[in-house]
Structures are given as C-alpha cells and as structure tokens.
Image: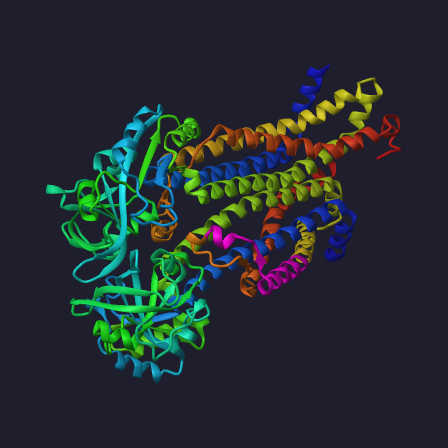
Amino acid sequence: MYKIAQHLAWLSLWRRKTRSLMVIMMIALSLSGLLGLQGLYDGMITHLINTTIRSDSGEISLYAKEYRLNKSLDHILNPVSHIEEKLLRVKGIKSYSIRLQQEGLIATAHKSLGATLKGISLESEQTFGQFDTFTTKGTYSFGEKNKGALIGSALAKKLNLEIGSRVIFTAQDVNNEINSISFRISGILKTGNPALDENSVFVSMEKMSQFLNLKDSATQIALRVEDTEQTEKIQKELRKSLENMEVLRWDELYPLLIQMRDIMEIFNLASYAIVFIVAALGIFGVMLVSVLERMREFSIMLAIGTPYKIVRDQIILEASLLGFIGFMAGAFLGWISLIYMSTAGIDLRSFEAGLEMYGYSAIMYADIHLYYFLQAFFAVFFATLLSVIWPLRILKKIKPIQVIQGKML
Amino acid sequence: MLFSLALKNILRSKGRSIITLLLSTLTTILFIIYVAFMDGSHHQFIKSSVEIYTGYAHIDLKGYRDDSGYENLIEDADRIDKILKNDSSIKEYAPRFETYVLLSGDEKAVGSLLAGIVPSAEKALSKLQDSLIKGEYLSDRDTNAIYLGSDLAKRLKVDVGSEIAMVGSSIDYSIAADLFTVKGIFKTGLFEFDSQSAFVNKSYLDTVMMSDNIASYFTLNFHDNDRIDKMTATLQSSLPSEYEAVNWKTLLSALVQAMLVDSIFGYISISIFFVVIFFVIMIFSYVNIYTRAREIGLLRALGLTSKNIFGMLFTEILLLATVSLVVGTIIGASIAYYYELHPIVISGIAETYKEYGVVSDEVPMHFDLFTIAWNALTIFMLNIAAIIYPISKINRLTAMEAMRYV
C-alpha cells in the first residue's frame, strides 16, 4: 500500500511540471546562494584567524605577568633558556618562537614614524608559521652579520622604503636609556595581520638583545601545537609548570575574532531561518493547490477504505520529494560554487586597500564543511514539513462522500 | 472594464492577494531598513573618521600623500592662507604641521605623531576640543603644553601635569628636542588615533621644528560639504599648479573601499532573500492564474484578445505591487527616519570593535529619499518580473485549450 502512495506521490509531482520545477528552482537557487555565502564568510574569518595564529599568537602565547597591560621591559620573560627547558618537557608542542619587542621610532632620511621593533629567529619563525611565504620583496634573511631587517609592507609603503634602504630605529633600552640602531631593509613582508604589516620591523634576536641590553630574555613566546584539539590541555599543563607567567590561548588574546565568528554563525542561521520560512510559504502554495484540485481523488481513496495515514503520507512524500530534489540541486550548485571559491578564490584586488585595512585577503577563499550541507538539509526538511501542515488539516476535515457528490468544496 | 475585472479578481482570490501584499510589503520594509542600517553604520564610520581629525578636505603639495616626509611640505603657508581666506565657499580652515617623534615619560618612550595645530581654529575643524577628558584644551598662546590621546598617555604612563621629553627631527633634519608638560588628555574613541597622537600649539612647535610659514597641509570645511566633489574641483582651479585640493573620499580611500565591499556583500546577502520572494510571488501568481484557466479561456472565447488578458492580469499585480510599495515605503521610511534621529544603541559595541574604528555605541540609520526610492522600486520591479512568466504561459493557450484545462 505504501508503495502505491510513493508511486502516486511521484506521479502527482510531475503532473504539474512547471509548478514543481518552480519550487525546485526556488529551493535550489536560494540554497546554493546561502551555501556559497556561508562558505565565503567562514573563509574570511578563517583567514583572519589563521593569519593571526601564524604570524603572531600561535595556538598559545606566554607573557610575563602584567606585560600585556604595560608593555615595558620591566615585565619580560627571563631566563628564556629555563622556560625552553620546561617547554621541551610538555608533550604536544610542535614548535615555538621566542620574540623580544620594543616600541619606538623608525626614521629614514626624510620621514619618521612610530613602530615596533621585533627580535626574532628566522629559522624558528619559519617552522612556526612559514614566515618566508609572507615575503613579497627582497629575501627572507637578515643579510650579512645580521645587519638587515624585514619590514611590514604597509609600514614600508608609508616610509617609501625599498630593498637596501637604510632605517634608524630609536627606542629605550632596559636601563631607560634612549638608543638608536641602524639597519638596511633586506625584505618586505605582507602577513595579512594589520598590526604587523603597519607597525613592525623584524631584526635578529641577537641584535635586538644587544640593542636593549638584555640577555636570554623575551617579551613573548608563541607556541604551535601538534593537535589543535589538545590546545586547552596543553595550556593547563603549561599553567602548572609556568606559574608566574600568563599562558593564553589565541582566542583569549584575540576575543574579537571569536566574536566575529559567532556573529557570522548567528547571521548564517538567521539567513537560513528567514529564507526557508519564506520558501515554506512557496511550497505551501503549491501543496495547497495540489491538495485542493485533487480533493475528489483523495475522497474516493478514503471512501474505498484507504487509511487516512496513507493519503497523509502521500502528501508528505510529495512535498518531501520536492524539497529533496531542490536540496540535491541546490547542494550540487552550492558545492560547485564552494569548490570554485575555495580553489580559485574571489579576486577582489581592486578593493585591496579597503580589505587589508581590516586584515582580509584581497583574494578571498571559501571554506567547505560537511555541516553546511546537513544544516541546509534540515532547513529544507523543516520548510517542507511546515508547508504541508495546513493542506493536511483541510484534508482531515473533509467528508469524502459529500465531496464525491460535489456538496462540499 | 479590465481594471474592474482585475479588482474583482484581487478581491476574489483573497489568499493569493494577501500573501502577495504581505510579502511585498514586508520585503519593501525589510529592504529599506536593511539598506538604511547598512548605510547608517557606514556613514557613521566615515563621519567619525572625517570629523574627529581628518577634515572634509585638504590642500597639500602634490606628492605629499605618497611621501608625507619633509620633502613635500607647503613652504609658503601664508600664500595658501590668503587664497583660502578669499574663497567664500570655505567655512573654516587651518594649517597643520605633522611629524613623528619619540615621546618619553619617566619610564617609557613611544613613537608618536606630533602635530602642530592652531588650537582656536581646530575647535570648528575637528573634535579635538570636544574629546577632552582631563585637564584643559590647548590655547593659541601655549608654549610647552602638549595635548595627548588617552591611550598614548597610558602607554607613556603620564597624566595631566607630567613632563614629557620629545626627540625628533626638525625640517632641516637636525635633532629637535624639547620638554613639554601635559596640559590635557583627550579620547575620541578612534583607538589608533588616541594611542598615537599628541598635539602642540603650532606657533610654538614652529620654533622647535623651524617650520615657520610651513605646513604639512591645510585642513578645511566647506559651507556645503554635501557637494564636496564640486567644491574641491572649484577650489583646485584657484590653487597654484603645484598644490592639490583633495577631499575625504580620496584621503580616506581605503575606508571608503572597505565600506563599499561591505555594501556589496550586504546586497549579495539580501539578494538571496529576493530570489525566494521572487519565486514565491511567481508560484502564487502561477497557481492563481492557472486555477482561473477556464475563466480566462471563456473570456478569450467571448472576444478578449491575449493583449487584453495580459492587461487584466498585469493590472492585478500592478495594483497589488503599488499598494504594497506605498505601504511598505511609508513604514520603512518612517522607521529609517526615526532611527536616524534616535539611533539604535548597542551597548559595548564601541569598546569591542574599537580596533576597527567603531567610536560610538550608537548606530544610526541613514534616511535618504533617493535610496529609499530605488529600494522600493527594486521590490516593485521584482513583483512585475515575477508575473511575466505565468502570464505569458497562460497566453500561449488558445481559448479552447484554456477552457479544457484541468
């Protein structure tokens, strides 16, 4: 009996092809658009998060207590070698980068700007976040005798610097004496992290320590973990062994990124809800007419003893088929667009300056996750069920004999 | 006759009419509010950036914007001053001299922007005085007084009355150094600005930097800032050829671009909603028209042409779309107008997004009649477009085919 209902549902669906196709197109087009946008928006946030982790925070960062509130050399990590020993004992740490930074003034022969000088190890940063891939000009090196410096692209642009240009950096050392140091630009970096690109100059750790009159010291140690699922566990372990330090995850250091991701999720869910409540109205329109124009047919079925359940299932099946075909078509189109956007990306280089201002990449890549499609499936399923409630109520209230005799409806 | 037939059909098919009306009206309201909200937040962003410090237009030496070093300064500021004084389109103006220096408190040194301003003129040109939170604003007679951004004061660990040492480079590239006393602290809400900016009376700074009769640029407001492009072009024609007049659209081009990208994504997001609305209206119209296929066939048999049928059905949607357009526009525009005057307050948004340039918890809507008109017209066209296919499909049937339609 149920097979007959299935067959009838399928046939009824194609009896009014145009109507069914309209519903399928409505679901497919809106769904593919929603999937494309969801992937693209997620991709934008993922890019921000990845860039931040790769270029700065790692999954976990260590600071001396109070350093983040008061970026003074009075609050530094020292001795670093002891901390390194402890880090080596913690399982799950893939790599780490030791950094020493100080704010000051960078000057060329013609111009000066406020900037941050960062002492780093090129090898560590390479393992940590493949730093060399950020190089847009020059080489990823500090040149002979570490006399070179790498500079953020936006800062280089503001100062009109080219490879080989000389800069002087002036800042206070650990004794509060004002010192100056000169470098030649050996490379220009574009990390995508506005704080670094607009403000940072990278020099060798040895030069930096010498400049600030410090030894075996750092302002930040950033860590990458082998398995991101283990980040919290490693953080707890580090907090136990490094009690006098701040051990913070990237999401604690950059809560704004998490907020942006949450807002985007809410936006996506709200979009699905609004679009599919309206789409349910479209399916409802078709299902209602489909039921009304076949009222005699259903009445005969009921009059000859077909249980109401079978008729009900036929209508639900009919709507579900519509929804399912729409979902499949939409998921396929959405998947194609997501594949394209995640590989080729969307080229927005004509808006580069505006996008970079907020840390977005000028070529945007989309994310693809299985849950997008599951979420979409449930939205379509919900819309389909919602659309048949009213037609089924009408069907339940009819008196089959009167309908057959033409006395009702 | 067609009109009365259309009206009767609208009243007879109450379900379809109500759904079409409701959908179109709600979509019109939603679209107007969505765009007003989006534009409002963008205007707020730009207005903050323009009015806090940048100003509506600048006059600088050509090349200054690419390389704002000492090579590209205005070296005869008095000459520009005279031109601006005689230009009736300019409401107020002032020269600024900007340089980057190392400021040191007792414990900490920070690289910062140090700008020489004319304190009295800046009252009308920027929000520097309005943003005072501690101490006093600068006066035109001040000498060693410095006016600091709140976050810069925190970074330097100084307060009103503290002494700050400044080391920089004067315009002949010799070392310039001086001691200043913090006279006041300001907070504009623009995080980067508050953490990197300090101001001194220009006439005094000129003696330290040897920049007398020299300016980095002039900032100005026109009487009619709404026609900024035209005003800037007119001003340009009165300037010597080595100078340029540029307005905020150029000065803040990155911000303008960012807002444009945000708008594009906003429109793409809402267009998905439009796709659904379009199909729902089309489905309801299609279903409604086809349930009346026999009636339409009869009308054709009675002598109405397919053009007449098209006219009748088109009039129906035209009436429904017009009513929803009028109602939706009135409601949407009223909401946009109300929230422009009484902005929505989202507590904490400025603090959370301070690094992104959000300076206020208030998010106003932007009421603009032209924008509202094209928003409403878009929904109107959506309605019209949705009916074209159902009408053309029914008109393809002959009178007999339509009457036999089951």
Please say if B239 is above or below B154. Answer: below
The quarter of the picture where the C terminus of chain A appears is top right
Most foreground residue, A68 or A123: A68
User: Is residue A51 at least partly visible in the picture?
Assistant: no
* Residue B177 image-quadrant placement: bottom left
Most foreground residue, A276 or A332: A276
Check the image and tell me how it is coloured: rainbow
Percent of width and height locating residue B54: 38, 66
Please, which residue is most extreme toward the left here? A144
Residue depicted at x 79% and y 30%: A395
Answer left or right for B51 relative to B363: left
The quarter of the picture where the N terminus of chain A appears is top right
* Residue B228 image-quadrant placement: bottom left
* Residue A374 image-quadrant placement: top right
Count of marks placed on residues: 0
Magenta stretch containing residue B85, yes or no?
Answer: no
Percent of width and height locating residue A11: 66, 24
Please say if B214 is above or below B190. Answer: below
Please say if B350 is above or below A338. Answer: below
Answer left or right for B240 relative to B331: left
Q: What stretch is highlighted in magenta?
A: B326-353
User: Is residue B398 at least partly visible in the picture?
Assistant: yes
Please say if B87 is above or below B269. Answer: below
Percent of width and height locating residue A382: 64, 32
Q: Is the magenta stretch mostly helix, strand or loop?
A: helix
Residue depicted at x 23% and y 71%: B73
Most foreground residue, A290 or B200: B200
Most foreground residue, B274 or B347: B347
Magenta stretch containing residue B337, yes or no?
Answer: yes
Percent of width and height locating residue A20: 63, 33
